[in-house]
Image (cartoon, rainbow, N blue to C red):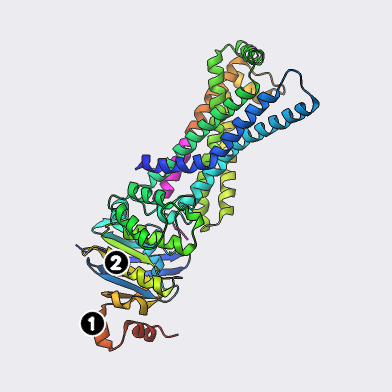
Amino acid sequence: MLIKLLKYDLKYMIRNMCVFYILSVFFAITTRLLSLPEQTVMIKILSRISSGCMIAMIADIIINVMMRSWVRFRDSIYKDESYLTHTLPVTKNDLYNSKFIQTLIFFFVGFVFVILSLFIAYYTPHTWLIIKEYIKAITTGFNMSMLFFITITFLIIFLELFNAIQCGFLGIILGYKMSNGKTGLSVLFGFVFYLISQTLVLSLVFVYGLFDNSVMELFKSGTINIDVNAFRVLAIVSSILYLIIIFGMSIICKKVLNKGVDIE
Amino acid sequence: MELLEIKDLSKKYENKYALKNINLKLSSGKIIGLLGKNGAGKSTLIKLINDLLTPTDGEILIKGNKVGVESKKIISYLPERTYLNKQMRVNEVLNYFEDFYDDFDIQKAKRLLKDLDLDDNQKLSKMSKGMQEKVQLVLVMSRNADLYILDEPLGGVDPATRDYILDTILSNFNENASVIISTHLISDIERILDEVVFIDKGEIALQSDTDELREKENASIDEIFRRMFKC
């Protein structure tokens, strides 16, 4: 049943997100076409507008995945659609897991379109070389492979965004449980959970720092001069913490959902 | 085994009981009218049976199963509001029901839609509320369920469509199934009811066979209801 639920959740998201994917690629192509070697003033203006539109679409892709995921979650679990959702012969865990996986998939798809659009718009052998050299300089300084650096950077960004989504889901569930359908409390709860999760990650990194001087330097030093070891530890420890928090929140969400809902 | 058994069921909102100590047994093969004034607790009871509310106390058993996946497989529920995703087309909704309910008869649904002059290629957002309600009724009645629960199926519908809905209900549920209909429009549904359950202030005020009740009181169900719940 999870696959069937996921099929319809993905369909909903594709329906709402494809316009942003199409527009971001469209403006990436126009940006590329307008970036001629010898530009007139008008072409320059159009090129800037096109580039600006593409950046706006890229931001829309990320923001919309978050907003749509929250809205979809709220509508199908607590609004009119919930009259169908909760009467389907599926478990509450499947209902939750479907939304969880759907968001995960659309973050990946979003990242792919962001990178694709940037590649189409700005790729030249020269810019590629600059990026490569820049990353190489960082990875050489931190004594790590380029693959590890790119992977860990994307993983942290991804986990950070996914943590925000999870806080939203938990906020919606607890907000509706406690306020009998008032959205305001859900938003407040979501925000509070986000602050708590961030504070928790920072506190646990601080605790780790008590046993590792290089990490503790991040809290003591006034300059941004990250030690090689500290960066590595920070990246790995915070990734693990985010993963634990995300899965911890999903367990709480499922437990509360399984206790039953009260639909208006 | 009873089709539906409710034991000591209560639902409390803050300090007020919406339902208090409900005990009810319903068997198969009947059309049951769940009747009561506004706010009597009819919809609360229906929502509890359908897992849309969590009971404060008590137990609900459907063919011996607690409310959950197994009970949802055999209950076909029509709520009083439109619950379909408006972005979908009617044929997508048919496929949705076919995907999730093993007992959904898509051919029957298409036939009923045709009878009602509803285009299965139309988007729900382009349909009027009345048309959406008809689509929902078709979906619900196209399942071969053991228990149909219809919450105010006649509300906001013209008399001609009302008759069509009642005929659809009568001709489309199988003999071994039961139908629970909650409504205020008692005179309209009286002719099809086998049994009535009167709810008042969150409690069962009366449960009886309709013919026996009519004979005993020498009045129609509508009259008995008016007498009983006179303000």
| Residue B58 point in image, percent of width and height | 33, 63
The residue carrying mark 1 is B212
Q: Amino acid at mark 2?
A: Val
Decide whether residue A256 is among the magenta residues.
yes
Split into 4 quadrants, where in the image is the N terminus of chain A?
A: top left
| Residue A152 point in image, percent of width and height | 54, 22
Q: Amino acid at mark 1?
A: Glu
- Residues shaded magenta: A246-264
- Image position of B101 (left or right of A239): left
Q: Chain of mark 1?
A: B
The residue carrying mark 2 is B179
Decide whether residue A251 is among the magenta residues.
yes
Report whether residue B56 is seen: no
Magenta stretch prevailing secondary structure: helix
Asked if badge 2 and badge 1 are on a common chain, one would say yes
- Image position of A102 (left or right of B73): right
Q: Residue at x 47, y 57 (%)?
A: A80
**Dot 2: what SS?**
strand
| Residue A83 point in image, percent of width and height | 42, 56
Q: Are marks 2 and 1 in contact (CB under 8 Å)?
A: no
